[in-house]
Amino acid sequence: MNKKTISIKILPDNILLKENLEDKNSTISLANLLRKNKINISFPCGGTGVCGKCKVKFESGIPESTSDEKRLFNSDEIKSGYRLACQTELKNDCEIFIPSTSKKNAIDTLLSKYEHKQQIKPIVKKLFLKLIPSHLGNLKSDADIVGTTLYNLTGKTYRSTLQYLQKLPVVLRKQNYQVTVTVSNNEILDIEVGDTSKDLFGLAVDVGTTTLTCSVVNLISSETIGTITAENPQSDFGYDLISRIDHGSKSKENLNQLQEMAIGKINELILEICKGNNISPLSIFSAVMAGNTVMNHLLLGIDPYSVSVVPYTSVVKNLPLLSANQLNLKVNPFAEVFMLPNLGGFVGGDITGDLLVTESINKKENYLLIDIGTNCELVIHKDGKYMTASSPAGPALEGAMIKNGMRAESGAITDIICINNDIEYLTVGNEKPIGICGSGLFHIIDFLVQKGVIDSRGKLLKPKNIENIHNKDVFTNRIKTDENGVIYFVLQNSDEENNEIVLTQKDIRQFQLAKSAIVAAWRVLCENIKINYNEIEQVFIAGAFGNYIRPEAVLSLGLVPNLSLDKIKYIGDAALFGSKMVLLNNDNIEKFKNILNKIKYIELSGRVDFQEFYINDLGKV
C-alpha cells in the first residue's frame, strides 16, 4: 500500500507538522499528534470528550463534527470550524488555530506561611575527616580507617554501602587522606575528595495531581535556595485521579509513561533551581516527597488500580526508603529518597505533611484540617485523637466541568467586585480575564447570592424574579438565555479582543456538588469522632486553591463550620513545608509516626450517613 503524508499547520505559532499515514483511509488522533510534538494544550478530562477544554478551530480542512462536539458547541461554532482535539481524527491537510483558553499557562506558587524556625538535625550529614593512613605497624583496611574515625567522632557505627566501597580506595589517596563522608542514620552514602562539608542540600517535592512543586534546601543553614512550580505533565491524561489510574492500569508501558513524565518534570525543576543558584545537583543528598496515594504509586511505577475499587486499598502505606538512582532522580545518585507515608484510601503523604505543619502551630485545640484540590482530604483532631477521610470533590474546583473554567493560571478570574455601577474582576497576574478558576467560581457565586441574583437553593434567577437589589440593571442586563433555553450570567461580553465569559446554571450545580461532598465529609468525621460542630476551635485550610478563597465566602457558603473569621487559618502548600520539616529535622519522622499510630481512616464510599449529609447540603449555597 502507498503511504499518505498530510501537513498540519498549528496557529498562531505557525508550527508545521508532517505525518505519514498508512494509506488514504488511515487517520491520526489530533490529541496524540499534539502530545507527541509537545504542543501546548490542556486535556482536563483525559480525552473523553466531556469537558470541552481542548477546543480548537479549523481554518481549513474542517473534519465532520462528533456527537460530543454537537453537545458542547452551538451551531455557529460548529459551522465556524470549532472542534475538540481529543475527538478529532485527521486524514487530510489542515490549518488549526489553538485559542489561548485551550492552552496551559504558568501556575502560581503559593508557599506555606509558617516557615518557622526549628532545630537543624537533618537526615543526612557531611563530616570532614583527616585520616591517618594504614602502615606496617598498624595495618587497617581502608574501610576500617574511615569507620574507626567516624566512631570516635560520632559514637556510631555506620554500615558501608557498595557504592561507597567502590569509590573509597581512589578518593582516600587523592588528597592525602583528607575526605568528606556523607552519612545517613546508619550507613555511609558517599565519600568525596577534600572538604565539601558546606555543600549539603536537600530536595522537598510536593507531588500534586495538578502541580509539581520543588524546593532545594540548604541542610546546614536551613535556607530555602529556590522553589519552582510546574504543571504535572500527567494531566495530559486527565486532571482527575481516576483518569490517571485508568490510563496507567491499561499496560506496563502506560504506567512507565506516567512515572517518567512526573520524574522528568521534577528533574527539570531541580536543574533549573540548581543552575539559577550556582549549585551542583550532585550536592543534593536527601529528598523528601509528599503526594496523595495515587501520585505516590505512579511515582514509583506501582499500578494504583486497587485504590480505585472496593475496598480501596493501596499497594503500600509505608513507602520504602529509596536511592535517587532507583528513581532516575537527577541529584546525587546515592541520595536517600524518603516518601511521606499514605494514611488510607486516597489520603496520602500530602496530608502527612499537612499534619506536621498543623501540629507545629496548633495549641492543643480541636481542629478541622481540609486540603482542597481535585480530591479533598480532611482530618478532624479531638483531644489527641485523629480521624481522616477523602472526599470526591470532583474537578469543578480546578476549573474543569465549568463552561469557562480554567486553572489558576494567568488571566483566570479569582474574585469579583462591584465598582461605580459596574462589575469588575481580579485575575491571576492582573491580566485580562480569559476564564474562571476555582476560587473565582467560589467568589462569583457568593457575590451573586449576596446580591440576590442566585437564590438560597442555587438557582440563577430570571430578571423578572429579582427584587430589592441596588443597581438592578447592572445584573439583570447580564442574564441571558441560550438557544436551548438555558439561563446564564454574562461576566464578560465577547468582542474582537475578548472571549465571552459566562456562569451557567450547570456551573452552579457543579459547584454545589463539589461543596456538598466536602461538607458531608467533615460532618461524617465529626459524628464518628463524637465532636459537636461548635467544639471545633480552628479550621486549617491547605493547598493553593484554598488559600485564594476569602474566609467570608468560605463561611457564607457553608464550606466549613460556622466559626469566627479569625479561627480560619490558611497554611498554603503545607505538604511541601512538611517535607522540608522532615529534611531539616530527623525527629519529625518520629512525630508523624506518633500521629499515624493515633489516626483512623474512614472510607466514605457507600456510607449512608455520608449520602444523607450530602443530599441535605446539595440544595443550598
Image (tube, rainbow, N blue to C red):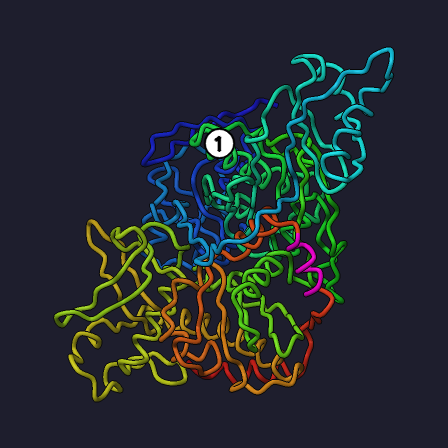
Q: Quadrant of residue 491?
A: bottom left
> In which quadrant will I find the C terminus?
bottom left
Q: Position of residue 298 (x, y in %)?
A: 66, 47
Mark 1, secondary structure of its residue: helix
Quadrant showing the N terminus: top right
Residue interval drawn in magenta: 587-595
Q: Nearer the viewer, residue 413 or 59?
A: 413
Q: Residue at x 58, y 81 (%)?
A: 523
User: What residue sits 37% from the left and 51% below the top?
Assistant: 409
In percent of the image, x 33 and y 74: which residue is there? Answer: 487
Taking the magenta stretch, the answer to whether it contains residue 608 is no
Kind of residue sitting beneath label 1? Cys
Closer-to-camera residue (466/226): 226
Query: Which residue is tagged 1?
Result: 274
Pointer 1 local density, CA inside 10 Å: few below 14, some 14–19, many at least 20 = some
* Residue ID at (23%, 57%): 494
Q: Is residue 48 visible?
A: no
Horizontal arrangement in the rendering, residue 429 relative to residue 329 (left or right): left
**In the image, 572: left or right of 182?**
left
* Residue, far left: 420
Would residue 378 be visible to someone looking at this image?
Answer: yes
**Image vertical order of residue 570 relative to residue 63, above or below:** below
Residue 518: percent from left, percent from top: 53, 73
Relative image position of residue 201 (x, y in whole percent): 56, 36
Q: Main secondary structure of the magenta part?
A: helix
Question: Total of numbered circles in the picture?
Answer: 1
Which of the 4 image quadrants contains residue 558? bottom left
Closer to us: 451 or 562: 562
Compared with 615, 589 (above or below) is above
List x then y, in percent, for residue 271. 50, 31
594 magenta-colored: yes
